[in-house]
Amino acid sequence: MNKLTTLEQAISLIGDGACVGLGGNTLNRAPMAAVFEMVRQKKRGLRVVKTAGAMDVDALCLAGCAASVDAGFISYESQYGLAQRYRRSVQSGLVRANEHACYTVISALRAASYGIPFMPVRGLKVSDLRKVNDYFADVTDPFTGETLAAVRAIRPDFAVVHAQIADSQGNAFFEGPKYEDVLLSRASKKVIVTAERIVGDGYFSGGERKADIPHFLTAAVVHAPRGAAPGACYGCYEPDGALIRAFLELKDAEALDRFLSEGGRRL
């Protein structure tokens, strides 16, 4: 089944209020073309899930798309500083921050991928995170009686990931670090893939490379060269420092709209 479509059509599948898990890690292989299309389509009330985010989460907060963020870390690489739009949105009460450790996001996604309601986490025995996030609770080991922390499963409505290679059926392959993208695809109800390169339908069946995301999980696939820009994509391009710094100067959603329009040839 051919699932190749336009970016506009793929992102139109995501309704307001959806839970959206974003692939990549900080400025590395984040699905920025898809995120910017969410901004253009003025999505609202999104519950954003990310292990370690940066411009993707920052942009959704600046545009007013995000209602909440479940994440272990939101910040740019050291030379670019903090994610100030996310910070201001949380401090002003516009966005709810469900703060995690990165591993508890992973554990919550892993629980969803296994079809179970929660996952025990030993590392939160003593943590202030448990006071500020109602996704954590105590659970008793039925075999030893030991009390452990547990995190509730997170099952996104959509995983949105950017891959180096995909075919028209929705099979996708990540070159270099995979981060949590494979797990995210298993935990989510549907997957949207953007890809640097679209290969023939026999690529995965006839070659040594096997798909990290199989076609039956994918709802839509989009040919999106530079789909992680202005961040990096392993083996394809490095971060665009000038564009990142220009983004960091933006003050409001209208400025973001102008940035997307003016920078369209490089994004």
Image (cartoon, grey):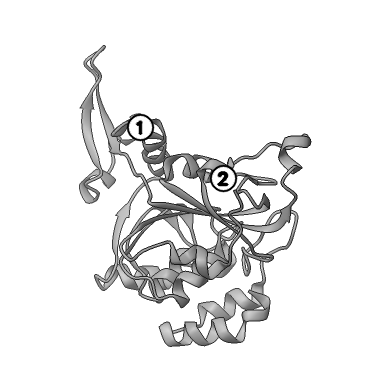
- Give SS at disc 2: loop
Residue positioned 45% across, 70% down in the render: 38
Q: Is residue 55 visible?
A: no
Select label 2 or label 1 by which is in front: 1
Residue positioned 24% across, 70% down in the render: 93
Q: Quadrant of the C terminus?
A: bottom right
What's the amino acid at mark 1?
Answer: Gly
The residue that disc 2 covers is 179
Residue positioned most to the front: 1
What's the amino acid at mark 2?
Answer: Tyr
Residue positioned 62% across, 70% down in the render: 230
Instruction: Provide residue 50's location: percent of width, then percent of height.
Output: 44, 53
Horizontal side of 219 relative to 88 (left or right) equals: right
Does label 2 or label 1 sit earlier along the sequence? Answer: 1
Instruction: Provide residue 96's location: percent of width, then percent of height.
Output: 27, 62
The residue that disc 1 covers is 115
Instruction: Provide residue 128's location: percent of width, then percent of height.
Output: 26, 46
Compared with 165, 261 (above or below) is: below
Residue positioned most to the right: 207
Compared with 240, 190 (above or below) is: above
Q: Is residue 169 visible?
A: yes
Residue positioned 51% across, 43% down in the render: 217
Instruction: Provide residue 20's location: percent of width, then percent of height.
Output: 40, 56
Horizontal side of 245 relative to 138 (left or right) equals: right
- Give SS at disc 1: loop
Residue positioned most to the top: 143
Neighbour class for label 2 at 10 Å: few (<14), some, many (≥20)?
A: some
Q: Nearest the camera: 109 or 136?
A: 109
Label 2 and label 1: CA atoms lie apart by 21 Å
Compared with 259, 175 (above or below) is: above
Toward which corner of the image does residue 178 lie, by quadrant? top right
